[in-house]
Image: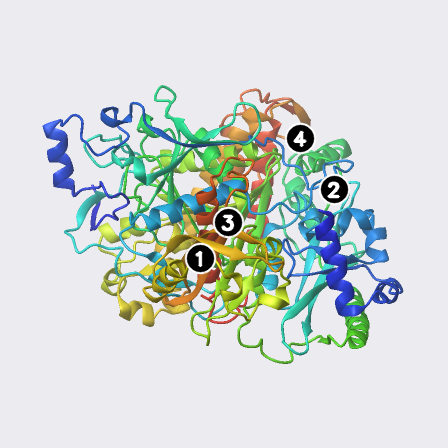
């Protein structure tokens, strides 16, 4: 837990320096910044305005995913739209119902934009601005979705007009009560949908510009430049951010190898792999895995691995590997070809397990099962995420 | 009697042709030697058991009032890992008829992003079998293939509710034949990675029909897997279910389905907080269910709707999406049209049987020509044939809402509310008449100003439904 928070702070400061916090804190708007490269896609920064609006403290938010603010009346389709925008790395603007710390639901205009690394074109952060919607368009919870105002009262006219008796005002109130039988748990009445005004949309756009401005400026100090638009295509050997996010959810130690590139480099390494071997990500991505082998590594096993890759078969071997600090460990290595949506092999996945470490996780899934589930998850991610003809409009 | 001919999909390596099945049954072979789930092989059999936690109340992430401090983002949920791991294990053991990841798939450019797959291995070059399509409820027939005949190696694990409210996993648990377990098995002709079958109470040999308990089990599975890309589906008889033994299907597709992207328009919310909307701008007309004060409330509302359709002999499909938080109910009539010869030969030639996955937007095509020419327009045209007509759809909806209102009322039921006259007749007419004629047994009529209604939830819901219909009529 602490290590994750440490990771978060480190990654944010490395890109923008410590001083960016102050600069961002000077902005009055409510916004959050999330990092897709960290497992769980957590919030890495929450503005003062956001804390005030939501009622949470910084400590309660940093490291958590944005879904913590959703609740029973949050529109699921809108959530899907946001999830897909994240997956496809594109900006989005929607009206969204969120919940404060005390459980109060509120409507806001949710505007999300991306920040890209200038050199590698990768999506480094998502910036989300929240503008509370104050304009009141009362749409009764009677299941009618009128857009004209006063539509509700007109309907009541018709109904009561056709009653042969006069209806007393008490009955009118009670009818309202019958119609409003679907109030939520807290007894609050909240609209089923809401539209942000032009003013609110402008507020959101300005806020995004300001934030991007700050981030761009501070990234210049570290030399790790960002910009609001993707400047160059992601370089060779890198994988798309959406695949990155999906793979980040797989907790086993594994790497992805691209057999089509010269010397078959590793194009992805999971956090658990880095922890197991002691390396940093930038030391290993782009390298062939042979750095794991050492003096006493059995060459026949290496040959076995090579053969499996050549024949496009899965294999499990026991191999002596070495960490960065030169200590060795027995690695129960499982390698499998991974196909993409074209049906052809896109990568090989290698899942590592250190022999002798706890044989089962706390739920009782065996070591073998855990390795296979990592392979399964990788297969789903690679296959699904390569199906797109390009982002589809929804 | 209406019948169509199609080649049934092979979901188990032990599924034989109709004639062979009948012959085997006739021989009454005991001790089949296949390691199946029947009495002959099941004694002493063991399978992994996943016991899920029954979550009865929907909580917001931070609790209804006040705040629960939660652990940071959990990694891949356990059930998710179990399904993936077990499935991959069967892949490596060669139990599938083909490698589905070697099947070319693409998203068709367009507004909705229909997904087309070229899968030549799924469909067999066999003689088509006759299926009766005009009876949604048919009795179980032990002579035909059913899931007690699958090999134990095809079963991944048992799936039951945990006794103590905590998730439990036993890597090797005996099968409790007395309390027939529910199991998850592989589909040996998968249409995507992870394609499995959820078979509630497998040994009870329930026919393909939804009941409240089974539907709730399916919802628990969706919720427990916690992965919005792991969806469950159900096909009734007459809506392209192949096997008349109660089962749901599920698989992974880490992309949105076109149906999930379609806009919706809210119709009403029930007394138990379930929001019911209708699909807009989608070739197949259907309803969307969300919300609910608890998973059980949502489940019961949808089950009641399904049961209503079954009892009215209307074939339908169900898609459980978004970790069980969004459920699509789609009545259909394609098989009927096919039996009556009303489907164009062009569509028939594609041999696409529009079941839940196809209707959701995932089209599995067996001819390269169809795959290469796949377009949003073609997909739309096919699915439009599946949909009920607007008129019929509205009739069916009225039936569904009546059934839901009754079910809702049975749950709610405290006397409340004072309302205008019993014979008030708003312009839409039909539905309010239904209220008056039907079941409010405690409705006292005749008093001049006010009526006290028991079962006010029923009336409240029906009134809101009427207003919705009225409003829709007025806006056109």
Mark 4 vs mark 1: give the one in front.
1
Query: Residue B128: x percent and y percent?
Result: 17, 50
Residue bearing the label numbered 2:
A189
Query: Residue B188: x percent and y percent?
Result: 30, 47
Q: Are marks 3 and 2 on the same chain?
A: yes
Q: Are marks 4 and 1 on the same chain?
A: no
Label 1 marks which chain's residue? A
Q: CA distance from mark 2 to mark 1?
A: 45 Å
Mark 3 vs mark 4: give the one in front.
3
Q: Secondary structure at mark 1?
A: helix
Q: CA distance from mark 3 to mark 4?
A: 69 Å
Density class for disc 4 (Cα within 10 Å; few <14, some 14-19, many ≥20) is many
Label 4 marks which chain's residue? B
Residue bearing the label numbered 3:
A353
Residue bearing the label numbered 1:
A379
Query: Residue A178: x percent and y percent?
Result: 67, 34
Q: Is B178 on the left or on the right of B289, as rendered?
A: left
Mark 2 vs mark 1: give the one in front.
1
Q: Nearer the viewer, residue A108 or A168?
A: A108
Q: Secondary structure at mark 4?
A: strand
């Amino acid at each position: 837990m602490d290590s994750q928070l440490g990771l978060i702070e480190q990654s944010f400061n490395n890109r923008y320096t410590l001083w960016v916090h102050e600069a961002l804190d000077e902005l009055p708007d409510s916004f959050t910044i999330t990092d897709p490269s960290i497992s769980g896609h957590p919030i890495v920064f929450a503005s003062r305005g956001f804390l005030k609006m939501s009622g949470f403290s910084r400590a309660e938010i940093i490291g958590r995913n944005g879904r913590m603010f959703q609740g029973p009346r949050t529109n699921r389709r809108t959530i899907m739209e946001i999830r897909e925008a994240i997956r496809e790395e594109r900006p989005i603007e929607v009206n969204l119902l969120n919940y404060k710390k005390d459980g109060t639901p509120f409507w806001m205009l949710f505007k999300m934009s991306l920040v890209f690394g200038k050199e590698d074109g990768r999506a480094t952060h998502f910036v989300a601005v929240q503008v509370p919607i104050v304009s009141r368009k009362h749409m009764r919870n009677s299941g009618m979705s009128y857009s004209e105002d006063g539509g509700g009262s007109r309907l009541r006219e018709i109904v009561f007009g056709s009653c042969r008796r006069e209806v007393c005002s008490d009955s009118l109130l009670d009818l309202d009560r019958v119609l409003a039988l679907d109030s939520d748990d807290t007894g609050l009445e909240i609209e089923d949908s809401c539209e942000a005004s032009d003013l609110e949309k402008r507020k959101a756009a300005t806020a995004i510009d300001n934030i991007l401005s700050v981030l761009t400026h501070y990234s210049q100090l570290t030399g790790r430049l960002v910009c609001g638009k993707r400047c160059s295509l992601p370089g060779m050997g890198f994988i798309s951010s959406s695949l990155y996010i999906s793979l980040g959810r797989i907790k086993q130690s594994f790497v992805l190898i691209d057999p089509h590139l010269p010397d078959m480099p590793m194009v992805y390494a999971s956090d658990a792999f880095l922890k197991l071997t002691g390396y940093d990500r930038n030391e290993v991505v782009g390298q062939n895995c042979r750095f794991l082998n050492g003096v006493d590594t059995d060459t026949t096993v290496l040959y076995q691995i090579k053969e499996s890759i050549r024949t496009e078969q899965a294999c499990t071997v026991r191999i002596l590997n070495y960490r960065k600090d030169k200590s060795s460990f027995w690695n129960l290595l499982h390698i499998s070809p991974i196909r993409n949506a074209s049906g052809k092999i896109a990568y090989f996945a290698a899942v590592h397990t250190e022999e002798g470490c706890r044989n089962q996780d706390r739920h009782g899934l065996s070591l073998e099962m855990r390795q296979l589930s990592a392979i399964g998850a990788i297969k789903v991610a690679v296959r699904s995420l390569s199906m797109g003809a390009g982002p589809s409009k929804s | 009697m209406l019948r169509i001919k199609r080649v049934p999909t092979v979901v188990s390596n032990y599924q034989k042709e109709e004639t062979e099945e009948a012959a085997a049954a006739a021989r009454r072979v005991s001790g089949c030697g296949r390691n199946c789930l029947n009495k002959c092989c099941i004694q002493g059999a063991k399978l992994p058991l996943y016991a899920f936690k029954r979550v009865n109340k929907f909580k917001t992430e931070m609790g209804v009032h006040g705040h629960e401090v939660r652990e940071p983002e959990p990694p891949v949920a356990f059930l998710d890992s179990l399904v993936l791991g077990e499935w991959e294990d069967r892949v490596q053991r060669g139990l599938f008829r083909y490698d589905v990841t070697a099947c070319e798939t693409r998203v068709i450019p367009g507004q909705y992003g229909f997904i087309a797959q070229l899968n030549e291995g799924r469909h067999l070059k066999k003689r088509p079998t006759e299926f009766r399509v005009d009876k949604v409820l048919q009795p179980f027939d032990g002579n035909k293939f059913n899931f007690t005949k699958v090999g134990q190696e095809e079963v991944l694990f048992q799936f039951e509710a945990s006794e103590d409210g905590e998730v439990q996993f036993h890597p090797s648990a005996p099968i409790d034949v007395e309390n027939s377990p529910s199991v998850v098995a592989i589909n040996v002709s998968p249409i995507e990675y992870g394609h499995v079958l959820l078979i509630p109470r497998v040994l009870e040999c329930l026919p393909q029909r939804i009941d409240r308990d089974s539907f709730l089990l399916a919802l628990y599975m969706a919720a427990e897997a916690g992965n919005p890309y792991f969806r469950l589906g159900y096909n009734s008889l007459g809506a392209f279910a192949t096997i008349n033994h109660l089962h749901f299907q599920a698989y992974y597709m880490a992309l949105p389905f076109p149906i999930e992207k379609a806009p919706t328009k809210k119709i009403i919310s029930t007394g138990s907080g379930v929001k019911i909307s209708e699909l807009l701008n989608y070739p197949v007309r259907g309803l969307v269910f969300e919300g609910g004060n608890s998973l059980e409330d949502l489940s019961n509302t949808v089950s009641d709707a399904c049961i209503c359709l079954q009892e009215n002999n209307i074939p339908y499909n169900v898609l459980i999406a978004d970790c069980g938080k969004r459920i699509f109910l789609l009545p259909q009539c394609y098989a009927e049209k096919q039996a009556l010869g009303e489907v164009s030969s062009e569509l028939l030639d594609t041999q696409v049987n529009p079941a839940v996955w196809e209707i959701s937007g995932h089209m599995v095509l067996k001819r390269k020509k169809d795959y290469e020419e796949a377009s949003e327009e073609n997909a739309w045209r096919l699915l439009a044939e599946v949909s009920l007509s607007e008129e019929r759809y509205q009739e069916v909806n009225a039936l569904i809402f009546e059934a839901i209102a009754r079910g809702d009322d049975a749950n709610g039921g405290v006397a409340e509310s004072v309302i205008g006259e019993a014979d008030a007749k708003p312009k839409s007419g039909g539905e309010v008449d239904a209220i008056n004629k039907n079941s409010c047994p405690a409705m006292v009529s005749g008093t001049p100003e006010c009526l006290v209604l028991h079962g006010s939830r029923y009336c409240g819901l029906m009134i809101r439904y009427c207003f919705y219909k009225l409003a829709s009529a007025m806006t056109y």
